[in-house]
Amino acid sequence: MSVLRARPARGPLLALLAWLALAAPTRADEAAAWAALRQGGVVALMRHGEAPGVGDPPGWRLSDCPSQRNLSERGRAEARAVGARLRSEGIAIGRVVSSPWCRCLDTATLVDAGAVEVEPTFANAFVLSEQRAALREGGRALLGRWRGPGVLLVVTHGENIAALTGTSPAPAEIVVVAAGGDDGALRVIGSIAAR
């Protein structure tokens, strides 16, 4: 009579190990981002909070917020939560700039980290696709000049952040970068997901 021996379940164990391997760099990535923000002199590129849909509705106008794609209640809550977390972590925000799109201005205002300045070079690179290269270079130049004091908080669109960093953030996610290297390139330090 043969004895059947149960083999350990490898599927769940392998899944757990894979998750741990992926989660560890994420935690380190977030820890590095927070450390850099505490030190200051870096840039926090924040994607606007959740705004359902893609692009803007037909006939939208920059001067008319109701004609644009706007923040959902969740997006508004995300923005407030990011602001509360920045304050609880003791992050000194030196300057806040935003895309002129209402969802970005609303996000920046709800973060409540200081007066919000409109910066056209962070305008929506998805909608203004024919201007994408100029927007990216203008953004890179502005970020490259930042030395502090504190953190430069830029609220913009996912497309703009991806063009600057190669990172495609989720709504209300912050990508922390160091600017002004010898070659003018931006160095991604880490990212902080919205909670």
Image (cartoon, rainbow, N blue to C red):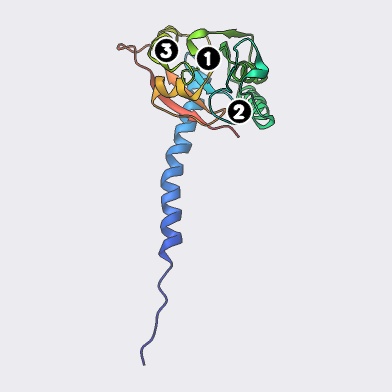
Mark 2 burial class by Cα count in 10 Å: few <14, some 14-19, many 20+: some
Q: Return the residue found at the far bottom.
A: 1
Dot 1: element:
strand
Disc 3 residue type? Gln
Asked which secondary structure carries label 3, the reply is helix
Q: Which mark is residue 151?
A: 1
Report the amino acid beneath label 1. Val
Residue 51's mark?
A: 2
Q: Earlier in the sequence, mark 3 or mark 2?
A: 2
- Residue corresponding to mark 3: 131
Residue shown at 54%/28% (left/top)?
Answer: 54
Q: Going from the N terminus, do you reach mark 2 or mark 1 first? A: 2
Of circles 1 and 3, the one toward us is 3
Is 152 or 148 nearer to us in this picture?
A: 152
Q: Is residue 74 left or right of residue 129?
A: right
Vertical arrangement, residue 11 with respect to residue 34, above or below: below
Percent from the top left, x then y, of residue 107?
62, 20
Q: Are marks 2 and 1 in contact (CB under 8 Å)?
A: no
Relative to 110, residue 5 above or below:
below
User: In the image, what residue occupies the spot 45% across and 49% down?
Assistant: 19
